[in-house]
Image (tube, rainbow, N blue to C red):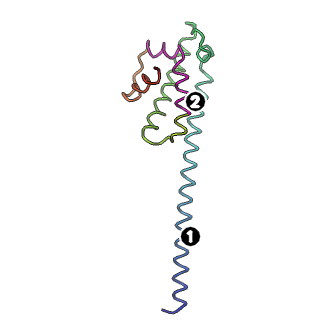
Amino acid sequence: MSIYEWLSLAALFLAAIVAIFQLRQSTLDSIKWQRLSFFEKYTARYQHIMEIMPECVLEDKPLPEKDEENAFRAIRLYLDLCSEEYYLYTKGFINQDVWKEWEEGMKEMFSKPALTRYIETKNPKYYKDFLNFMRTIRQ
């Protein structure tokens, strides 16, 4: 093989390495954007739920009977969101740092009397693992 053939082969090899690196970087960037989009969607859902949650629930005040239906609707939405987040965490789609933050927020919400009242009176139906998680977090 001549020196020109070796140089051509080296250039081809270098071009392949650069292409592989760029593809890898592009994939990593895409994954990062997907995670950010995922996080933004769950954050937006959470914010919406907190906007419609009656103040008396968030302030640990007694829940007036007239507010019960709206409060229970918001609580059901909140529990649905928590159920999805818990499932995604157990399947490895939510990293540990994010989960710790979400779990702390859940502990706070699960301590609210209105949420306890909803769980005890409505007996919501969720999958077994999440029901066990709810029991644990409420203790």
Of the pair 87 and 54, the residue shown nearer to us: 87
In the orientation shown, which residue stands out farthest toward the bottom? 2
Residue at left offset 51%, top offset 82%: 9
Residue at left offset 52%, top offset 36%: 99
Residue at left offset 45%, top offset 42%: 92
Contact, CB < 8 Å: mark 1 with mark 2? no
Q: Is residue 25 above or below residue 137?
A: below
As for residue 119 lying within the magenta part, the answer is: yes
Mark 1, mark 2: which one is toward the viewer? 1
Secondary structure state at the residue bearing disc 1: helix
Please indicate whether residue 60 sits to the left or right of residue 136 in the image. Answer: right
Name the residue tied to disc 2: 46
* Dot label at residue 18: 1
The image shows residue 61 at horizontal and vertical percentages of 60, 11
Q: Is residue 112 above or below residue 3?
A: above
In the orientation shown, which residue stands out farthest toward the left? 128
Q: Where on the picture, by quarter, is residue 124?
A: top left
State how far apart marks 1 and 2 are (Cα).
42 Å
In the orientation shown, which residue stands out farthest toward the top? 65
Q: Is residue 74 above or below residue 21?
A: above
Secondary structure state at the residue bearing disc 2: helix
Q: Earlier in the sequence, mark 1 or mark 2?
A: 1
Residue at left offset 51%, top offset 42%: 95
Instruction: Give amino acid for label 1.
Output: Val
What range of the chain is rendered magenta?
A: 101-120
The image shows residue 100 at horizontal and vertical percentages of 53, 34
Q: Where on the picture, by quarter, is residue 70?
A: top right
